[in-house]
Image: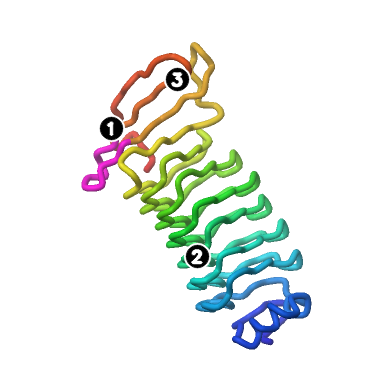
Amino acid sequence: MNKINGVLNKVTDEDLRLLKLFPIMFWKEVTKIGEYAFVNCKSLQSVKIPKSVTEIGAGAFAFCESLRSVTIPETILKIGAGAFTHCRSLQDIAIPGSVTEIGAGAFGNCFSLQIIKIQEGVTKIQDGAFMGCGSLQCIEIPKSVSEIGNNAFTLCKSLQHITIPETTNLRKNVFDFCPNYLQIIKTPSCKNSNTGTPARISATKSKRNNNDIRFHHSTFPQGEQKRTLKPEELEL
């Protein structure tokens, strides 16, 4: 098996058989999953990354179309660009707080991905990280996330609800081509000055014209107040 200084490189079919039969031997002394190590391993269905690993390289599991289950330990510090892109069968993922950044396109085009749990500690979601996750319906962004990159949730065509800290900076086109009616709930400091209750913001976006964005602001349990924001006022 191709291991150099703790980095697991290109995995062969024989290596996959070893992983299935003797996982402890397979992962021995591995500290990093190298770039494109498992790329296009179409027979790989599940993987439990051991605690010895601290980094998942760019494209490490790209195009593993049968991959349904991934366990990421709390020792992982970095998930590289495109690490799990086009894992069409992946349905849920939990990203531990040890991960500081979710790389660009890391879970792009994971069409079956329905549940994403991002734990407190993650600070940045890079460009296109979850682009094209067409089955994703809702997600909660933890308070530790300071920035969400360009097109991070573009083409998430089933996305209905997302909870984002008010202090999180949204880059351009974060929600391009999402459903026409997407509820964005900003927490925790987004308060009504009179009631102190959380504010809910619902964004309506036109797929034909990205500048046609209307926000409806309401507080609970009182009634709704509607207002229209100009595109230049938004950080999308």
Looking at the image, can residue 145 be seen?
A: yes
The crowd level at tag 2 (other Cα within 10 Å; few <14, some 14-19, many 20+) is: some
Identify the main secondary structure in magenta: loop
The residue identified by callout 3 is: 219
Asked where in the image residue 5 lies, by quadrant, the reply is bottom right
Residue most toward the top?
A: 194
Magenta part of the protein: which range?
204-213
Q: Earlier in the sequence, mark 3 or mark 1?
A: 3
Query: At 68% across and 66% down in the image, what residue appears?
Result: 48
The residue identified by callout 1 is: 230
* Residue 139 rendering spot, x and y as whole percentages: 51, 44
Query: What amino acid type is highlighted by mark number 1?
Result: Lys
Foreground mark, 3 or 2, reads 2
Residue 198 magenta: no
Looking at the image, can residue 127 be seen?
A: no
* Residue 143 rendering spot, x and y as whole percentages: 59, 38
The residue identified by callout 2 is: 89
Q: Earlier in the sequence, mark 3 or mark 2?
A: 2
